[in-house]
Amino acid sequence: EDQVTQSPEALRLQEGESSSLNCSYTVSGLRGLFWYRQDPGKGPEFLFTLYSAGEEKEKERLKATLTKKESFLHITAPKPEDSATYLCAVRPNSGGYQKVTFGIGTKLQVIP
Amino acid sequence: DGGITQSPKYLFRKEGQNVTLSCEQNLNHDAMYWYRQDPGQGLRLIYYSQIVNDFQKGDIAEGYSVSREKKESFPLTVTSAQKNPTAFYLCASSYRDRFSYEQYFGPGTRLTVT
């Protein structure tokens, strides 16, 4: 069974204090790993797709990296507007296009 | 602008009543999905559809029903048979026949049943 574990569950940072969120996964062959941002009471907003170990993608202060067992979302010099829950999800090679497993998320709070 | 809309944003119902949640997309995506989000749990798949007039059960389909009469629309009915219907419901869509399958989500509907 595919599994996604995100850590920490919650993270509190001072504005400008860089850090990383972790997504550990177990999947029978990875087709893609997805990162989303979710604000309270809203739907998840797509950020990145990573396909293979060693791949990196960046968007503003966010950088996502991928290894064979985990992915990191690095946040450089965060601002209060980066406060949100960040979700990780994986799609395996087999099982159909609908088979995506989501983690519970990391709730990030950036304090001014 | 392309996107996914869900309505209403908030919905209140009494036990024993069926309720239908709306989901529309103009992204020209073939596949559409319904998820349920509860505190402390990852998103759980209720139903999905890859083509008009065809849909399949997800992991937690009991007490729910869907239809797909148009490519753009995928409404979800929460029936009185659903034992714990209070939750945040998310609709999503994606391409089906491309390498990249990232799903795009709507704003969600919060359903409260008392």
Image: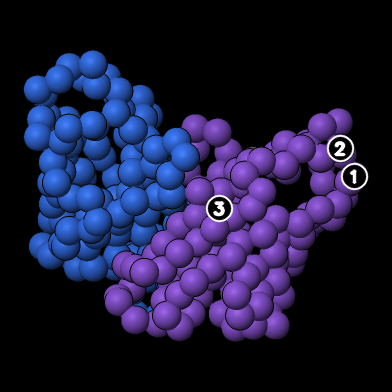
Chain colours: A purple, B blue
Query: Rounded to the nearest whole Å, what is the CA distance between mark 1 and mark 2?
Result: 6 Å
| Same chain for the residues under marks 3 and 1 in the image | yes
Q: Which residue is mark 1?
A: A16
Look at 42% across and 62% down and name the residue there: A101
Counting residues from the N terminus, which is met first, the one under dot 3 or under dot 1?
1
Residue A63 appears left or right of B76: right
Q: Which residue is mark 3?
A: A87
Give how far across and how far down residue B43 sits, in percent: 40, 50
Give how far across and how far down residue A112 sits, in percent: 86, 31
Residue A52 appears left or right of A103: right
Residue A25 appears left or right of A9: left
Above/below status of A71 relative to A30: above
Tell me which amino acid carries mark 2: Gln
The subunit carrying tag 3 is A
Look at 55% across and 33% down and name the residue there: A40
Give the structural element (helix, strand or loop) at label 2: strand
Tell me which amino acid carries mark 1: Gly
Q: Which residue is mark 2?
A: A14
Query: Rounded to the nearest whole Å, what is the CA distance between mark 3 and mark 1?
Result: 22 Å
Label number found at residue A2 = none
Query: Rounded to the nearest whole Å, what is the CA distance between mark 2 and mark 3?
Result: 21 Å
